[in-house]
Amino acid sequence: MTGPAAKGPEGKGLAATGLEARGLVIDVPGRPDGRALDLAIEPGQRWGVLGPNGAGKTTLLHTLAGLRPPRAGEVSLDGTPLARRRRRELARHLGVVFQERHDDFPATVRETALIGRHPFLSPWRQEGPEDYARAEAALERLELSHLAERELATLSGGERQRVSLATVLTQAPRFWLADEPTNHLDLHHQVAIMTLLAEQAERGRGVIMCLHDLNLAARWCSHLLLLYPDGEACWGPAEAMLAPDALERLYDQTLTCVEVDGALVFVPRKSVCAR
Ligand SMILES: Nc1ncnc2c1ncn2[C@@H]1O[C@H](COP(=O)(O)OP(=O)(O)OP(=O)(O)O)[C@@H](O)[C@H]1O
């Protein structure tokens, strides 16, 4: 394919520490296999997954989290295939921020954040002071302390999104898999969340997030994976992947690209009406 050179640790052994896809073909119903993915999300890295609606970003994230099986290839954590690990054990390492939410039973904001501790509690042990302290710290970090007693169903979309992030922060996983983490968020909270994820990476966590905002991706991601609707893909360090022609092809949208404060900024061009 044309566009940025695809890169990946093809031919290397399994990563000793990291979340690694080897020969991975995600199972998007009715789509040809496309390009198999060979990449590793290592501690300290911030990966962004870009692509148009329906390209398979959520499918990829769920496959990397072990929530759905791949069509081919495998995902491993620290060299062990996810399929050979127990779900509960995986939940201690992998934190997923879901795009869609199912708030079927009533719970407060604090109770929801505490769910992040469940993978660490035995079935007969209730949350202790340390679990509560972690949840309170996460709620404070997400500017939610004042809403701790509120029922989830009463929250706004952006508040609910921050509760999802607070729950994963309470979990403190080694790898964050976040599906559109800035969904519903105002500008201040978008930047706050990207700063939080960058801090997590600085502390040795690995981060992979699906994003629709090219400019957040350009500013905050160390690595990018471009997923095309036909299953083609390319990936590598962000600076190599931010080629305007490849991004225009990805989104079927012409772009103007300028540099601001040392970061590339992409602005969609208005389409010209044919008369
Ligand atoms: N159970 C299913 N049956 C049929 N098609 C499905 C099913 N689940 C997902 N798909 C299709 O798989 C494709 C990939 O979906 P996915 O949610 O991974 O895309 P995405 O890139 O995350 O999209 P978006 O940007 O809109 O969130 C879509 O075309 C979707 O309609």
Image (cartoon, rainbow, N blue to C red):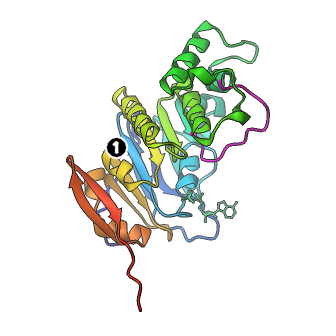
Residue underneath mark 1? 220
Residue 12 visible in rendering: yes
Residue 143 versus residue 19 in the image, above or below: above
Amino acid type assigned to the residue bearing label 1 in the image:
Trp
Q: Which residues are magenta?
A: 97-109
CA neighbours of label 1 inside 10 A, class few (<14), some (14 to 19), many (20+): some
Q: Position of residue 249 (x, y in %)?
A: 38, 72
Q: Position of residue 70 (x, y in %)?
A: 59, 54
Q: Position of residue 66 (x, y in %)?
A: 60, 43
* Majority secondary structure of magenta residues: loop
Q: Residue furthest bottom?
A: 275
At a point 72% along the width and 12% down the height, the residue shown is 125
Q: How many marks?
A: 1
User: Is residue 19 or residue 99 the one in the foreground?
Assistant: 99
Query: Circle 1 — which element?
Result: helix
Q: Residue furthest front?
A: 275
Q: Is residue 106 magenta?
A: yes
Find residue 130 and report its image quarter: top right
Q: Is mark 1 within 8 Å of ligand 1?
A: no
Is 151 left, or right, of 156 in this rendering?
A: right
Quarter of the rendered image showing ligand 1 = bottom right
Is 110 left, or right, of 240 in this rendering?
A: right
User: Is residue 21 or residue 191 the one in the foreground?
Assistant: 191
Residue 235 versus residue 45 in the image, above or below: below
At a point 64% along the width and 66% down the height, the residue shown is 29
